[in-house]
């Protein structure tokens, strides 16, 4: 995948010289401030997607970090290359769906903005702490809400007790990785046409290879018990709670495969352990996601769409 993407990017760069003038390369972007709950989200406008009103740089003014807030655009441009298929297909899907990208310093600032609360009570802070503990980003589900969004937090609450709780800051590598992981959930949401009308992570075929991978991991990893405790979040079937739409899925495994495919390995646990295990034991689901990105369709059981015999 990396080799192919590299080649296509190089080809596009060569072809691009002389075709694209300065006016296209230097789109004039500006920002429109939207302030709620004392938190300002600067909506980026005037550029090409997502800088056409779909990217928001959010912070309290004092800690505004332009480089950090621009990261989603940079990550995305790296994800789908210049003019290459199927990366372009992915970008078109995101643009057509109007997926919005929000970067917040932390979940408390996000909740202040979302709920328009300038001075949260200790009870609100306690609830937010419990709800967002250890959460570094999330995606909204287009089947459940009209808003399609990737929301990421630079800083997150690690295990601890409020107040004040213990927080940690994502490294640069992990922050980019989180953005791509959340993009993976949106890619899952937006490709039902490639998986028989359901999210790929909900499909029978993805479940088939996920079960194969999980069984292979449990049978062959000498530290399966420890690793399943550390990174099991990514490796388990989520039985959901019976809501609509059906929420029985392997969505985390799908999204992390996407993140690993596009971005590479995370720097820190639990994603770093997950990425290492995907490389060794979860090659069938890894192939499923890679195949979708390469060929813009889901792989078919029993065929050489899977390049490892045990996956067929
Ligand atoms: Zn996830």
Image (cartoon, rainbow, N blue to C red):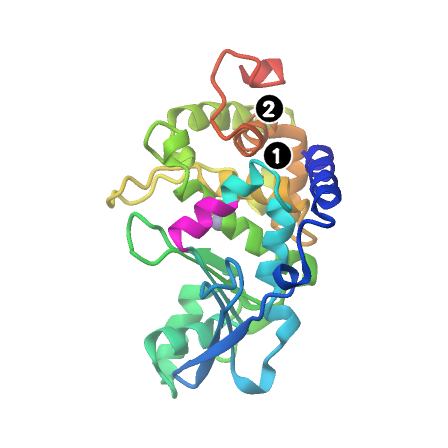
Q: Can residue 21 be seen in this view?
A: yes
Q: Is the magenta stretch mostly helix, strand or loop?
A: helix
Asked if residue 97 lies in the magenta stretch, the reply is: yes
Which of the pair 182/266 is nearer the observer?
A: 182
Identify the residue under disc 1: 224
Q: Is residue 222 visible?
A: no
Hey, which quadrant is residue 247 in on the image?
Answer: top left
Q: Position of residue 310 (x, y in %)?
A: 58, 15
In the rendered view, would you say 53 is above or below 291? Answer: below
Label 2 – label 1 distance at C-alpha = 8 Å
Q: What residue range appears in magenta?
A: 91-98
N-term-proximal mark, 2 vs 1: 2
Q: Which quadrant would the N terminus be assigned to in this image?
A: top right
- Mark seen at residue 142: none
Query: Image point 73% across, 50% down: which residue?
Result: 18
In the rendered view, would you say 290 is above or below 21? Answer: above
Label 1 secondary element: helix
Q: Where is residue 217 in the image (x, y as percent from the top left)?
A: 59, 28
Q: Is residue 177 left or right of residue 35?
A: right
Query: Image point 41% across, 30% down: which residue?
Result: 194
Asked if residue 67 lies in the magenta stretch, the reply is: no
- The mark tally for this picture is 2
Query: Image point 52% across, 22% down: which residue?
Result: 212
Identify the residue under disc 2: 219
Hey, which quadrant is residue 273 in on the image?
Answer: top right
Label 2: few (<14), some or many (≥20) within 10 Å?
few
């Amino acid at each position: 995948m990396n080799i192919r993407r590299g080649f296509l990017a190089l080809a596009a760069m060569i072809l691009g010289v002389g075709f694209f003038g300065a006016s296209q390369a230097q789109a004039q972007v500006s920002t429109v401030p939207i302030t709620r709950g004392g938190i300002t989200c600067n909506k980026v406008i005037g550029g090409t997607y997502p800088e056409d009103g779909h990217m928001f740089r959010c912070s309290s003014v004092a800690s505004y970090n332009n480089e950090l807030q621009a990261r989603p655009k940079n990550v995305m441009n790296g994800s789908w290359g210049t003019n290459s298929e199927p990366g372009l297909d992915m970008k078109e899907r995101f643009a057509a769906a109007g997926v919005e990208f929000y970067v917040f310093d932390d979940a408390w600032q996000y909740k202040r903005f979302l709920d328009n609360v300038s001075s949260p009570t200790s009870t609100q802070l306690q609830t937010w702490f419990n709800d967002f503990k250890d959460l570094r980003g999330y995606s909204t589900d287009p089947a459940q809400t009209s808003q399609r969004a990737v929301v990421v937090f630079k800083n997150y609450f690690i295990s601890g007790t409020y107040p004040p709780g213990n927080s940690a800051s994502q490294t640069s590598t992990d922050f980019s990785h989180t953005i791509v992981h959340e993009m993976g959930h949106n890619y899952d949401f937006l490709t039902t046409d490639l998986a028989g009308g359901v999210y790929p992570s909900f499909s029978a075929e993805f479940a088939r290879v996920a079960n194969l991978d999980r069984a292979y991991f449990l049978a062959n990893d000498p530290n399966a018990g420890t690793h399943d405790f550390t990174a099991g979040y990514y490796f388990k079937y989520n039985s959901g709670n019976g809501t609509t739409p059906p929420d029985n899925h392997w969505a985390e495994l799908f999204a992390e495969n996407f993140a690993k495919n596009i971005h590479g390995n995370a720097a820190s646990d639990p994603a770093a352990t997950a990425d290492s295990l995907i490389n060794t034991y979860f090659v069938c689901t890894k192939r499923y996601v890679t195949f979708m990105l390469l060929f813009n369709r889901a792989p078919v059981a029993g065929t050489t769409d899977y390049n490892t015999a045990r996956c067929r």
